[in-house]
Amino acid sequence: MKTIFAGSLHPLGIHRVLEPIGAMPQAAWKLNAEPICAENEILCDVEVLNIDSASFTQMRDVCENDPARIGEHIAATVRQRGKQHNAVTGSGGMFIGRVAEVGSRLRDRLALQVGDRIASLVSLTLTPLRIDAVERVDVATGRVWIRGQAVLFETGLWAQLPADIDENVALAVLDVAGAPAQTQRLCKPGQTVVVIGAAGKSGLLTCAHAKARVGAAGRVIGIAHDASTSGAQLLRDAQLVDALVSADARDALAVAQAVETLAPQLADVTINCVNVPGTELSSILCTKDEGIVYFFSMATSFTAAALGAEGVGRDVTMIVGNGYCKNHAQIALQTLRDHPQLRAYFESKYATPV
Ligand code: NAP
């Protein structure tokens, strides 16, 4: 096959980087999104993008909730950068698509056929993407139906869509799969866990896993912006939390005070699942000395977290929310199978419209 790439094909996709030369694809400003399948790539016809929540919230605000403007904003970013990489939040999302071609070097190695439907498990911030048309933007869920093509690199992660779960539900869950899997790892029996942004997608899955891990001797406290939403209602009805607090996570003192009232020793583990900036200090203040703060939120500022903890003299271990964790896709999808009420909620919100 004729190659359009100047250097040799690299498993990490470096051959797709246009600007600046030498950068890794995620850090690069611009990728070559030419929809040609190199020998070590997978080319996909993309159907739906699930835009990262922090990114979608930022674009929704700038575009004043107008789906047409949001669609044009996304198309412009992709034209300019060859990937859906929000320059303000730095985050992306993932896609569902159909395999159009598997590069010759990968054909024998991967259990993947042309026509298979897959979800990408690597960020859109490093995925070469071309959009031919934006067909629909769902402002409520951050999903964007497009016609276009994307490339997965040799090392890129992907998952076959499960046969028993609606694909748009799967997309919503897989986007945040790192959170429930990391929660399983971090939480221990008997602990107190605080989940900030508990009523969102990752928050709900996180609460389900935290509750199972801490057991009867432990405690899960959810912080939700608005305790009257359907997500908050689900947290109570399905007993995914032991207590639910309605608070603005940007108000560090209010959050810390509420947590201290419920758990005077504070949290062993705090998991931040919000989609807005300015919540680092509330996460730190509600965590006990030598506890763990897991920042899953993409709106987290390293500077605010590091200097904030120093400023209040709190010796906490702070973990960056790696989107990947071994078996994260299976763990996240299994959560829905194990929790019928949670599954019904995700289906009511995210299932494919008929
Ligand atoms: P989501 O479904 O939109 O949920 C976000 C939640 O945060 C909502 O329940 C929202 O409540 C709540 N929230 C917003 N502002 C708040 C405030 N001031 N106080 C308290 N709660 C507030 O988002 P998601 O898909 O679960 O994603 C959560 C975060 O994870 C985002 O930042 C996203 O970018 C990030 N993420 C990280 C990774 C990773 O690899 N680390 C991967 C995917 C996503 P209301 O709607 O009621 O305001």
Image (cartoon, rainbow, N blue to C red):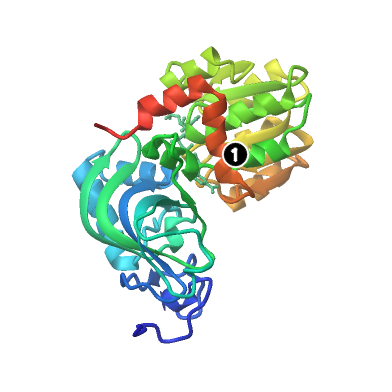
168 on left or right of 279: left
| Residue at 44% from the left image edge and 70% from the top image edge | 41
On the rendered structure, is 196 left or right of 57? right
Q: Is residue 287 left or right of residue 45?
A: right
**Image location (x, y in percent) of residue 233:** 47, 16
Q: Is mark 1 within 8 Å of ligand 1?
A: no
Answer with the quarter of the image where residue 279 lies: top right
- Relative image position of residue 271 (x, y in whole percent): 62, 36
Q: Residue furthest top?
A: 237
At horizontal 47% and vertical 44% (from top left) the residue drawn is 175
Q: In this figure, which residue is indicated by the disc labeled 1? A: 331
Q: Residue at x 47, y 31 (%)?
A: 200
In the rendered view, tell whether residue 105 sits above or below residue 179: below
**Secondary structure at numbered mark 1:** helix
Q: Quadrant of the C terminus?
A: top left
Q: Is 70 drawn above or below residue 333 in the view shown?
A: below
In which image quadrant can residue 85 be found? bottom left
Query: Above or below — where is 116 with respect to 243?
Result: below
**One can see residue 186 in this view:** yes
Q: Is residue 208 left or right of residue 13?
A: right
Q: Where residue 45 sits in the image (x, y, percent)?
A: 31, 58
Q: Position of residue 244 (x, y in %)?
A: 57, 18
Q: Nearer the viewer, residue 222 or 175?
A: 175
Q: Amino acid at mark 1?
A: Ile
Quarter holding the N terminus? bottom left
